Every structure is written in structure tokens, then in C-alpha cells.
Image: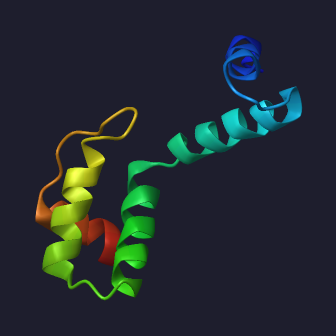
């Protein structure tokens, strides 16, 4: 699985092959998260930091632009519906 990337990491970093493979798998799992899962997770994380919804949804909207495959821009209403149904 992704041998070329694992080989590149072992050549360009001090990681061993097993460690490089785990890094690749962790990164792929992170980006495999759906938009809805990402929005819900980030909402929970930002709530625990004491942010209010206005700040949370603004930050989530900005974060979505930097996903590996960015979804279409979501309105505040769409973000709220993902979180609260």
C-alpha cells in the first residue's frame, strides 16, 4: 500500500519502514473523514476550547477550505444542520 510514498519517507526522514507506513496510514485515515464527520468532530473540539457557535462555525468554514479535497463552501446554516440535524 503506497510503497512509493513509504520509500520516499524512509529516504527523506529518519523513520524506519514500519514507522513510515504507520504515518501514511494515519494521514490517509485523517483525510478519509467525510465532511460531516469533520464538521462534527471540529465542533466538539472547539466547544471544549470554550468557543461559542458563531466563532466555531466561522472557523470550521475556514478549515474546510484546506481539506485535501475541499467540499463546496458551506453556509452557516448548512454547518449547523450537520451538527444539530
Q: Nearer the viewer, residue 83 or 8?
A: 8
Up-down: is 54 above or below 77? Answer: below
Q: Is residue 85 visible?
A: no
Up-down: is 27 above or below 38? Answer: above
Up-down: is 53 above or below 39? Answer: below
Quadrant assignment, res 73: top left
Up-down: is 81 above or below 28? Answer: below
Q: The N terminus lies in which quarter of the figure?
A: top right
Q: The C terminus lies in which quarter of the figure?
A: bottom left
Quadrant assignment, res 32: top right
Q: How is the image coloured?
A: rainbow
Residue 67: horizontal and vertical position, in percent?
Answer: 36, 40
Residue 55: horizontal and vertical position, in percent?
Answer: 16, 75
Q: Report the number of discs.
A: 0
Which residue sits at x=76%, y=31%?
Answer: 20
In the rendered structure, the answer to whether residue 1 lies left or right of residue 45 reads right
In the rendered structure, the answer to whether residue 7 lies left or right of residue 65 reads right
Which residue sits at x=41%, y=85%?
Answer: 48
Most distant residue in the front direction: 14
Quadrant assignment, res 14: top right
Q: Nearer the viewer, residue 17 or 61?
A: 17
Q: Is residue 62 visible?
A: yes
Which residue sits at x=15%, y=65%?
Answer: 58
Q: Nearer the viewer, residue 15 or 45?
A: 15
Which residue sits at x=67%, y=19%?
Answer: 12
Residue 50: horizontal and vertical position, in percent?
Answer: 31, 88
Amino acid at each position: 500500500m503506497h510503497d512509493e510514498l513509504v520509500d520516499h519517507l524512509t529516504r527523506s526522514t529518519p523513520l524506519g519502514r514500519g514507522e513510515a507506513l504507520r504515518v501514511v496510514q494515519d494521514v490517509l485515515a485523517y483525510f478519509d473523514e467525510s465532511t460531516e464527520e469533520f464538521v462534527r468532530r471540529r465542533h466538539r473540539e472547539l466547544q471544549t476550547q470554550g468557543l461559542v457557535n458563531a466563532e466555531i462555525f466561522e472557523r470550521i468554514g475556514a478549515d474546510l477550505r484546506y481539506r485535501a479535497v475541499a467540499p463546496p463552501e458551506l453556509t452557516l446554516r448548512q454547518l449547523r444542520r450537520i451538527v444539530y440535524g
